[in-house]
Amino acid sequence: MARIVMKFGGTSMAGSERIRRVANIVRRQQAAGHEVAVVVSAMAGETDRLVNFCREANPLYDPAEYDVVVASGEQVTSGLLALTLQALGCKARSWLGWQLPIHTDDAHAKARIGEIESEALLASMAAGEIAVIPGFQGVTDGGRVTTLGRGGSDTSAVAVAAAIGADRCDIYTDVDGVYTTDPRIVAKARKLKAVTYEEMLELASVGSKVLQTRSVSLAMKEGVRVQVLSSFIDDDATPADEIPGTMIVSDEELEGLDMERQLITGIAADKNEAKVILTRVPDRPGAVATIFGPLAAANINVDMIIQNVGRDKGETDVTFTVPSADLLRAQTLLEAQKEAIGYNRIITDGKVAKISVVGVGMKSHAGVAATMFRAMADRGINIQAISTSEIKVSVLIDEDETELAVRVLHSAYGLDADDAAA
Ligand code: ASP
Ligand code: MG
């Protein structure tokens, strides 16, 4: 017997028919002898609809009341799933965020989970009752309803799994796992048997949005084993123990799970970056601090940074990237600081993409970056900026070359499905 948390997203919960499918998947898991808690999202589109109502009611809405409104989508689906399970002859009950309770801080609309009380929950699960928990919501110490930020029910699921010491947290979603790259770009992309938390974080932060990033950090911190798998499985399919999704685990566990791992785990593309160049910045102590200080204060995340040397007269060009959505704000801020920084010109480019190769294997292997640069050079793709971490190399290129770059790298690292089978 294992203790399992199953999480279903909005697409899986959209309507009675789909909820019945979910209930069947849950029932089979319990019938396989497991203790089961289910965490659900609101029906697809519902949270957007509720957010709109808040905006219409009051454009300057009070976040505490916003939370009361938007948390309701998950209240509906958790009740409906409990009802549907009961209709199938299962014992089931819902546990709203304030009932368990799931304690959070009072940062409304983006609250963080503190403690989850699990005693009553565990007792009910041990008695054979399926626990249905709405994702996304919690309660402050003052008794007010909170929500965790969009996409937050992944984080709820992981937090519940940590609180009840679950053997696994299965996240059922629209895709059937984590792939070496976006299968819509590379038809030969392969589903990975396992990735490490760190790899998943890097992949998520560079654009493959399978899970909310916060849920992965939490899983890593709490050591929760997460599996990503498809909710589009047949009604008579085997329980999840035998369905191969992608496991997200620690480095140590990874070794045992996937023996045929390649040096590189995945390739991600992110078109939501924009490039900023400040020319002829004085090359003296404090110069970059005057550039990045104000951006940080405005909560603008700077990613890649290059400071070019080689200009004479003690000047340098500084290139960096910011999220596209923040480009205008960043530009305005920097223009206001022109005197203080002392640059000559500001040049921006929103048509760039960041391509990243990710893999824990590169911790112990040289030459990963060299392979990347060579492969791109051979196809005439120009690299505008580079950044690296222990398990990632990223380059900035022209957005129009995104698909080509991803395909070229996918073969360069031997990730194409045919190579791997050979
Ligand atoms: N329903 C919430 C949202 O749409 C939370 C979630 O589904 O993860 O953001
Ligand atoms: Mg989601």
Image (cartoon, rainbow, N blue to C red):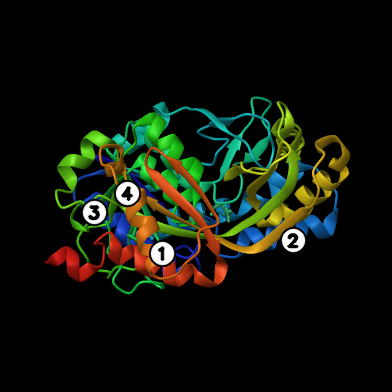
SS at badge 4: helix
Which quadrant of the view contains residue 340?
top right
Which quadrant of the view contains residue 193?
bottom left
Between disc 4 and disc 3, the foreground one is 4
Measure the C-alpha gap from mark 3 to mark 2.
39 Å
Q: Which of marks 1 and 4 is nearer the N terminus?
A: 4
Left or right: residue 288 versus residue 237 is: right
Residue identifier under label 2: 52
Question: Of residues 291 and 219, which is closer to you in this image?
Answer: 291
Measure the C-alpha gap from mark 1 to mark 2.
47 Å
The disc placed on residue 343 is: none
User: Which amino acid lies under the numbered mark 2 shown in the image of this protein?
Assistant: Asn
Left or right: residue 26 versus residue 274 is: left
Between disc 1 and disc 4, the foreground one is 1
User: Which amino acid lies under the numbered mark 1 shown in the image of this protein?
Assistant: Ala
Measure the C-alpha gap from mark 1 to mark 4.
14 Å
Measure the C-alpha gap from mark 2 to mark 4.
46 Å
Question: Of residues 112 and 255, which is closer to you in this image?
Answer: 255
Residue identifier under label 3: 193
Q: Residue at x 31, y 36 (%)?
A: 166
Q: Residue at x 38, y 30 (%)?
A: 222
Does any portion of residue 163 appear in the rendered image? no
Residue identifier under label 4: 368
SS at badge 2: helix
